[in-house]
Every structure is written in C-alpha cells, then in structure tokens.
Image (spheres, rainbow, N blue to C red):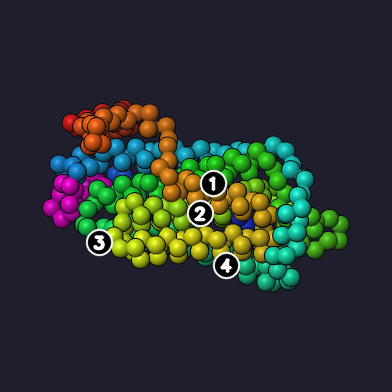
C-alpha cells in the first residue's frame, strides 16, 4: 500500500501521484469503449479518423502508454528506492540565496509551503487543462483534444520519473536538515522519509512542465486563438505560476536555489518540446517532400474478450 505523507512541508509524493494516475487511466480507458456512438454523432472525430473506434486506436494513444510506462516506473522507484548517497557539499550560491530568500519564522515558512502547493496546481493542472478545454470548445475536435491530453500525461509522467530518479541518485539533504541535531529546532521532521530528496525540486519541475505544456498548446496548437494576446497571455500566466512555485520552495526552506533552477530547466524542456517514450519505437510514419503524411502505422497493446496482445493500425 502506498503511504501518503500528509505532514506540512512534505514534497510531491511521486509514488502516490503515479499510482493515482495509473488507476485513473485504468478506469477511463474501458469506459471510452462504450462511447463510440455518442462520440461519432456529437464530436468531430472524423477530422482525422473515420470513427471513434479508430480514434481510440490512433497513434496518440502511444503517448498515453508512454506516460503510463513512466508513471509505473516512478511508482516502483518511489516504493523500493532509497537515496544511494548523501550530497553534503553546499555552494556559495545556495548558501547565500537561502539566507536571502528563506522566510524568518516557522509560521511564515509553513504558509509559503502551502502556497507553493496551490501555485503548483495552477501551473501543472489548471492552466494546461483549461487550454485543452478551450481548444475543444472552440473547435469541437475530440481528436485534437485527446492528442493534447495524452501529451499532458506523457510529459507529466516523464518529468515525474526524471525527478524521482535524480532524488534517489543524489541523496541531497534539504536545507532544513542543517538545523537538525540535539536540541535544534527545525520546521520539518528531521528523520522524515524525504529529508535527503532535495535535488531536484519536484514542485519546480512539475510546475515548469505545466508551463511548458501551456506555452506549447498556446503557440503550436493555438488553444486559445490565433491572436498574439491569445498565445502570449496563457503562456505568461503559466510561467509566472511556475516561477512563483520555485521561489516559494526556497522561501519555505524546502529546497536550495539550484534544486529549483534545475527543476525549471528539466520541466520546461519536457513540457514544451515533444517527449519520447518506448512506444515511439512502435510507430511508423512516412511523409512526402512537402511534409504531408502519406502513411502512418502504430503497434499498441490491446485486450479483446479476455485475451491480451498487440494491435497494428496502418493509414495511407
């Protein structure tokens, strides 16, 4: 059973989040099989595919399976992994930034910790999912909306797995650990499970992933419209929420500045640029000189009447 850490000041519970996402997908995917007639009649699934059934087996679902693979790996790492070594060196930038940004009282640091949770939710979930909804409401195109959703799941899963892997590999103590010791007062439990999981900041990496996705949805897919304001405004709001999340993690004494900066770099890169996963090896695509798709093929897991296997789809 996954143990959720509910104490104030806890970092992102990667194993719990990964298990929750896998459970959610396992519920939604079978349910989608019952929606063929409604989808075909109400939504514009015919924009790229002939039917809702073909849409369900489209190559966009490879992104979903990539994301579920990343989430499964994260859950295993979080459940069975432990930091392999302790990173004890502190550089001057981290030392001075902690002195300058760390809030002065334990009460204010707890409030900053809570505020970072709220800004994380805004950047990672609220704005990107609102962008998907805006695109769907403007166009009614369920294919595009589903493709954006699987992009979200894939990017989220990859960032989560990278974050957990680095936390376990580096074993860096959180800033408040310096205050632990006989008779010392600290904002967090000095023997907590995540006290040596400072690098990288999970809040910063996930918030930046959400910001990167929002910018990609706004500029590449024109989720909110084609005007400059419709592209720039959501991207700016996502980036502002992500930046606030990182600063609040330092102010709450949960992370060093370099933890946050590294999380920003990794998360924004994964979120904005197209991600890659193992199921991409099972894709085939051929384009002409003008860049138009001539043929597409994808091999995906499938289950029919109690039997599991793979399904190959080819469009030309």
User: Residue tagged by mark 4?
Assistant: 115
User: Residue tagged by mark 3?
Assistant: 137
Q: Earlier in the sequence, mark 3 or mark 2?
A: 3
How far across and how far down the image is residue 162, in percent?
A: 55, 42
Q: Earlier in the sequence, mark 1 or mark 4?
A: 4
User: Residue tagged by mark 1?
Assistant: 266
* Tags 3 and 2 touching, CB below 8 Å: no
Corner quadrant of residue 63: top left
Looking at the rendered image, the disc whose residue lies closer to the viewer, 1 or 4, is: 1
Q: Residue furthest right?
A: 182
* Tags 1 and 2 touching, CB below 8 Å: yes
- Is 100 left, or right, of 308 in this rendering? right
In depth, the one of 91 and 291 nearer the eye is: 291
In depth, the one of 315 and 212 nearer the eye is: 212
Corner quadrant of residue 187: bottom right
Check if residue 44 falls in the magenta segment.
yes
* CA distance for labels 3 and 1: 31 Å
């Amino acid at each position: 059973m996954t143990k959720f850490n509910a104490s104030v000041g806890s970092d992102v519970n990667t194993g719990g989040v990964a298990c929750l996402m896998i459970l959610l997908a396992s519920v939604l995917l079978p349910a989608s099989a019952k929606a063929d007639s409604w989808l075909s009649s109400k939504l514009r699934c015919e924009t790229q595919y002939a039917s809702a059934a073909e849409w369900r087996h489209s190559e966009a679902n490879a992104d979903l399976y990539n994301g579920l693979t990343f989430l499964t790996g994260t859950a295993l790492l979080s459940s069975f992994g432990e930091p392999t070594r302790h990173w004890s060196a502190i550089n001057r930038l981290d030392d001075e930034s902690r002195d300058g940004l760390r809030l002065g009282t334990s009460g204010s640091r707890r409030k900053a910790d809570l505020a970072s949770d709220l800004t994380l939710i805004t950047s990672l979930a609220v704005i990107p999912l609102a962008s998907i909804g805006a695109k769907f409401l403007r166009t009614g195109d369920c294919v595009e909306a589903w493709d954006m959703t699987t992009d979200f799941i894939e990017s989220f899963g990859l960032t989560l797995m990278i974050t957990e892997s680095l936390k376990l590999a580096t074993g860096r103590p959180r800033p408040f650990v310096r205050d632990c010791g006989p008779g010392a007062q600290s904002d967090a439990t000095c023997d907590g499970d995540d006290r040596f999981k400072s690098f990288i900041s999970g809040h910063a990496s996930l918030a930046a992933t959400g910001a990167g996705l929002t910018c990609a949805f706004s500029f590449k897919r024109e989720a909110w419209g084609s005007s400059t304001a419709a592209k720039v405004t959501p991207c700016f709001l996502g980036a502002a929420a992500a930046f606030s999340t990182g600063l609040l993690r330092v102010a709450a004494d949960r992370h060093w500045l370099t933890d946050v900066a590294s999380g920003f770099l990794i998360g924004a890169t994964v979120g904005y640029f197209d991600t890659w996963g193992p199921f991409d090896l099972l894709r085939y695509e051929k384009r002409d000189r003008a860049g138009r798709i001539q043929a597409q093929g994808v091999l995906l897991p499938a289950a029919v009447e109690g039997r599991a296997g793979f399904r190959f789809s080819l469009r030309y």
